[in-house]
Image: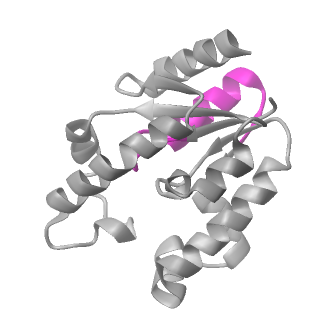
Amino acid sequence: MDNIVLCGFMGCGKSTVGKNLARKTGKKFIDMDSYIEKKAGMTVTEIFDKFGEKGFREMEHEACKELSNMKDLVIASGGGAFTFKRNVEVFKGKDIIVLLDVPVETIKYRLRHDKTRPLLQKPDRDRVMQELYRSRMPVYRSAADVVVSGKNTPLSTAFAVLEAVNSIK
């Protein structure tokens, strides 16, 4: 098991915790959305505008395949990546998938000023977030090898992830 792959709902701290975790483990940090943006030469929002969600999900799947073939990474997956079985299958059994579990109310607070996530740019943002959260969390749980609370500081969450990962190795 080479890579640690963080999954969870948008705003759960995958990128921030991932950077801390990479520093603690000596692994390289990769944010999947940033990786896709760099390859595409445009932002996630621009990709959604130009190619739709379907086009973005194809790019995301390609990124999953590429990243799973690399070694010694801490990967912050996109919030929707693990809602697709084909993406889970790319990592499952090869890398350790960690769910950062954060209550929806905490996420709503963390994302209260966010204007960058295409799926949240809706008039009834709270309802959309609640429905997405309710539908995605069971899927994340079934994908994860281990679940860690992401309510604490990014550094203490990174230590909790490290402890959890080491306990299953």
Q: Position of residue 134 (x, y in %)?
A: 28, 47
94 sits left or right of 29 in the view? right
- Using the image, determine if residue 69 lies above or below residue 145: below
Q: Residue furthest bottom?
A: 50
Does the rendering let one see residue 34?
yes
Residue drawn at 48 percent across, 17 percent down:
156
Residue drawn at 58 percent across, 80 percent down:
55
Task: Report if residue 10 lies within the magenta region.
Answer: yes
- Using the image, determine if residue 93 lies above or below residue 78: above
72 sits left or right of 138 in the view? right
- What colouring does the structure picture have? one colour
- The part of the chain drawn in magenta is 7-29
Q: Position of residue 140 (x, y in %)?
A: 47, 42
60 sits left or right of 115 in the view? right
Question: Which quadrant does the C terminus fall into?
Answer: top right
Does the rendering let one see residue 11?
no
- Using the image, determine if residue 114 lies above or below residue 133: below
- Using the image, determine if residue 54 lies above or below residue 4: below
Question: Which quadrant does the N terminus fall into?
Answer: top right
- State the image quarter where residue 123 is shown: bottom left
Residue drawn at 69 percent across, 69 percent down:
38
Q: Of 77 and 112, which appears nearest the observer? A: 77
Task: Report if residue 126 lies within the magenta region.
Answer: no
Q: Of 81 and 74, which appears nearest the observer? A: 81
Q: Position of residue 74 (x, y in %)?
A: 69, 37
* Numbered disc total: 0
Q: Position of residue 148 (x, y in %)?
A: 47, 23
